[in-house]
Image: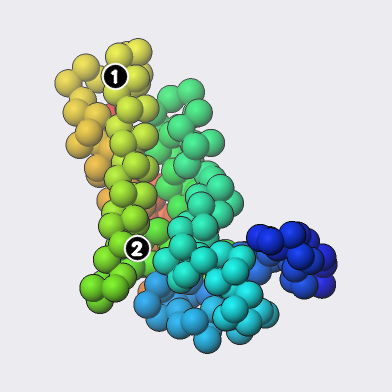
Amino acid sequence: METKQSGPIGRPRGFDADEALERAMVAFWEHGYEGASLTCLTKAMGISTTSMYAAFGNKEELFRKVLERYTEGPSAYLPRALEEPTAHGVATAILAGTVRTTTRPAHPNGCLGVQGALTVSDSGRGVRDLLVAWRDNGYSLVRERFQRAVDDGDLPPETDPGLLARYLTALAYGIAVQAGSGVGRDELQEMADAALRNWPLS
């Protein structure tokens, strides 16, 4: 859909920047950072390379904007999960959100934050480091939530919140990798349910 938005120097922009960013997110999600060439990205976005640079910056800057969109959109289940009243509820919601997000028919399988830049050349190290920090931040949020659960008596006092958070996030990332390999939603949810049957109770 053609819309007129102000460009960086005040002139009308002949494309919907929000829609273009959404399409770029899908392209990076499907192909990974290095697999998504400039030609692939601009074709998916429906704009020229010049327009892409003017609106979003270079490829790495575009990816950073895409990751923000992914965090606030498909990956927004994480902050919602952390609000669950129990640690078990948090874990259940995180794994259910991971399964749901990584197997949606309308989106690529897998997780942009996990598979976007696992292996990159020197030029992609900034993006790889960005995704490492993104995953570490998710882990830290879960660890802090589990520490509160220990303090509140919701988890046994001997529970190591860091180890439990590492276990949960590793399982979630493993689900994402399996989803990217084509494993179906039902099987992944069964795996998540099996893991939660061993959850520590207070």
> Between marks 1 and 2, how big is the CA–CA gap?
35 Å
Colour convention: rainbow
Residue beneath disc 2: 127
Question: Does residue 179 appear anywhere in the picture?
Answer: no
Q: Nearer the viewer, mark 1 or mark 2?
A: 2
Q: Are marks 1 and 2 in contact (CB under 8 Å)?
A: no
- The residue sitting at 48% across, 23% down in the picture is 85
Q: Quadrant of the N terminus?
A: bottom right
View extreme (front): residue: 9
Q: Nearer the viewer, residue 200 or 31?
A: 31
Q: Residue 132, how many percent across, how many down?
A: 29, 54
Residue beneath disc 1: 150
Q: Nearer the viewer, residue 136 or 46?
A: 46
- The residue sitting at 34% across, 42% down in the picture is 137
Q: Residue 196, how many percent across, how many down?
A: 35, 41
Q: Amino acid at mark 2?
A: Val
Q: Amino acid at mark 1?
A: Val
Instruction: Tell me if residue 183 comes above or below residue 200 in the rendering.
Output: below
Secondary structure state at the residue bearing disc 1: helix
- The residue sitting at 25% across, 44% down in the picture is 167
Secondary structure state at the residue bearing disc 2: helix
Earlier in the chain: of badge 1 and badge 2, it is 2
Indicate left or right for 143 with 51 as reference. Answer: left
Instruction: Tell me if residue 201 comes above or below residue 100 in the rendering.
Output: above
